[in-house]
Image (cartoon, rainbow, N blue to C red):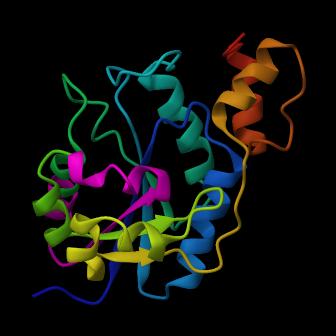
Amino acid sequence: MKDDKIIVVFGGSFNPPLNSHFSLAEQIISEYENVEKLIFVPVNQKYQKKGLLDNKYRYEMLKSVCDKNDKFEVSDIELKKKRQPYTIETLEEIQKQYPEKTIWFTTGSDNLKELKTWEKAEDLVKKFKILVLERDEDCLEDIIKQDKFLSNNEKTFIKVKNSVRSSLSSSFVRNKIKEGKSIRYFTPDEVYEYINRNKLFE
């Protein structure tokens, strides 16, 4: 029997983690009173993405911030794998760790449009709730309406309330570093200092 507490899983490359990642996480926790904590899950460096930092760096940057917030946690669940696991595999493993809790997965509306192509998409939408952050000019209701798979599983999707939209991206921040420009205030101070100390993205 599950209690009424929710664990939110926030996956991503976090290359590097930005203020916008953490402000979204804080917003989710404050908007949904049953959310017990939010777990950041960085992807494995085997994930096919150009310029992805080693697992160690991305994990430690997230941890430097999460250690100062008792509602935040960072998991190395995907980093320990020999390949990049599918989302369904990660969520099922986290569910085993928290059998009494309800698991929500956070994704952007851009990714939602491709959800039907994900591994075991049918299982994913039946087993877990999906918290959707609207990106750019996207409207969640319109995206669902225009996609049969999504509309058939409409009750699975929850729109992030009153979300503050940000066009800031990790790639923008990486480019600023390469140009020798300041990234202060784009990332938390802990991340900013970590990047400088380890001379990342230069």
Describe residue 59's horizontal placement relative to residue 17 as left or right.
left
Say if the magenta span includes residue 73: no
Q: Position of residue 90 (x, y in %)?
A: 22, 48
In which quadrant is the C terminus drawn?
top right
Residue at image x 64%, y 71%?
163
Say if the magenta span includes residue 108: yes
Position of residue 97 relative to residue 174, above or below, is below
Describe residue 139's horizontal placement relative to residue 202 as left or right.
left
Residue at image x 23%, y 53%?
116
Q: Position of residue 37 (x, y in %)?
A: 44, 69
Q: Which of 104 and 2 is in front in this view?
A: 104
Q: Which of 168 and 71 is in front in this view?
A: 168
Residue at image x 90%, y 21%?
181
Residue at image x 68%, y 53%?
20
Q: Which of 180 and 100 is in front in this view?
A: 180
Q: Where is residue 76 in the image (x, y as percent from the top left)?
A: 34, 39
Position of residue 95 relative to residue 177, above or below, is below
Describe residue 106's horizontal placement relative to residue 152 as left or right.
right
Quadrant in the picture for residue 185: top right
Position of residue 10 relative to residue 194, above or below, is below
Quadrant in the picture for residue 61: top right
Q: What stretch of residues is rendered in magenta?
A: 92-117
Q: Where is residue 128 in the image (x, y as percent from the top left)?
A: 22, 69
In which quadrant is the N terminus drawn?
bottom left
- Residue extending farthest to the right is 181
Describe residue 6's horizontal placement relative to residue 171 as left or right.
left
